[in-house]
Amino acid sequence: MIVLASRSAAAQAEPMPVWTFGGFGTAGLVHSSERQADYSANVINPGEAGYTDRWSASVDSRVGAQLGVAITPRWSAVLQVISERNLQNSYRPVVEWANINYQATPELNLRLGRIALPIYLAGDYRKAGYALPWVRPPVEVYGSLPVANSDGIDASYRWQAGAANNLTQVFYGHTSVQTDDSGKRARARQLMGLSNTTTYGAFTVRASALTAELTVDLARPLFDAFRQFGPQGTLIAERYDADHKRVGIANIGVSYDNGVWFVQAEGSRMNARSFLGDKSSMYASGGYRLGDWTPYATYGRVVANVPIHSDGLDASRLPAQAGASAAYLNAQLNGLLGRIAVQHSVSSGVRWDFLPDYALKLQYDRLRPTGGSSGTLINVQPGFRSGRPVHVVSFALDFVF
């Protein structure tokens, strides 16, 4: 972790146990031009920039603290707690990481507890804004997997192939997140995956895949209502209800950073086999360091691999009252499908490292949801129109301690 890296060498020379402490934070402010939806970094962190407030501090603002202890040369533990906006309109701190590590051999490390999911290039530090060149990771890719940890076990093995260093990780666990104030949750069980990170000089490549059994309670009443319409309603419910559905994510990312300039790109596919959709996403980004200043630019895109509209129930032969109910259910279903992101964006920004451990960032994003989709926007209102460009301006002060 970035906040502990500078302390690691000193820690190895001290008697055991050795305690370390550090933290990170972001104070952000975001403006969106869209008045009929809110801009957000991901669906479980409602940013409220746009429809709710013209300017919002909740899109990117967070603070985190990390406590580590090296108990023996082989045993260690880490605890990370983060406070950020959640779906319950609260900044209540949550445990992001809490695990015990066992260094079985110089090459093999085992962990038990709550661990970071090794998905995406920035998967291990995506919430530590200071470690990122941008204000936030590109939402087209990183918004597909808003949950960044799991409770379970993993094993990491370091190995070499010529001059290339590799870290291969396998992991197994489960995770869940509360989706509203009524206690509804999204649960991922039997979560398992494989990741390999290769470094060769200034190059880094990470390839990873994840699968889990996903259940989302949020839309359950809607699909229970569909089932009341007999076989055709049951067929629709079985197709779209996220009830014990096998979700899969595959991702590959490549970066080159020689200290003066950087380029990186990632491509990802997520198939939830439900109303959450089947999406392919990518971004490409680059920047150049001019002393304390780093200007950068990014292009992002996400497309749906399935239709984001359904004919739903055939109400033509139903009585008037039942037909009206069927039409209402069809509209609700298509409202859900319209949230499957179809969007492209261009971004530009600049980072200013004005003090050690402090960085100030300014970023402009122009995103356009298309094809009837609301893209990565949330809290969509009836007056929203897909196809219009949305202009987003973000300021962020990132720091570590």
Image (cartoon, rainbow, N blue to C red):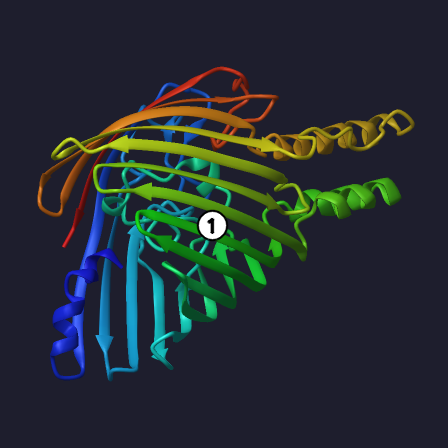
Q: Position of residue 145 (x, y in %)?
A: 49, 47
Q: Secondary structure at mark 1?
A: loop
Could one spot residue 68 in this view of the protein?
yes
Most foreground residue, 183 or 179: 179
- Relative to residue 88, is residue 222 drawn left or right? right
Please, is residue 52 above or below residue 186 in the view? above
Q: Position of residue 183 (x, y in %)?
A: 51, 55
Most foreground residue, 272 or 346: 346
Could one spot residue 363 in this view of the protein?
no
Q: Position of residue 143 (x, y in %)?
A: 46, 41
Residue occupying image coordinates x 63% and y 40%: 277
Residue occupying image coordinates x 63% and y 47%: 272
Which residue position holds label 1? 181
- Relative to residue 67, is residue 39 drawn left or right? right
Please, is residue 290 above or below residue 13 in the view? above
Most foreground residue, 325 or 315: 315
Please, is residue 317 above or below residue 91 in the view? above
Q: Position of residue 354 (x, y in %)?
A: 9, 37
- Residue lying furthest left in this view? 355
The residue carrying pointer 1 sits among few (fewer than 14), some (14 to 19) or many (20 or more) residues within 10 Å by Cα, namely: few
Residue occupying image coordinates x 25% and y 82%: 73
Q: How many marks?
A: 1
Q: Amino acid at mark 1?
A: Asp
Q: Quadrant of the N terminus?
A: bottom left
- Relative to residue 211, is residue 103 drawn left or right? left
Quadrant of res 262: top left
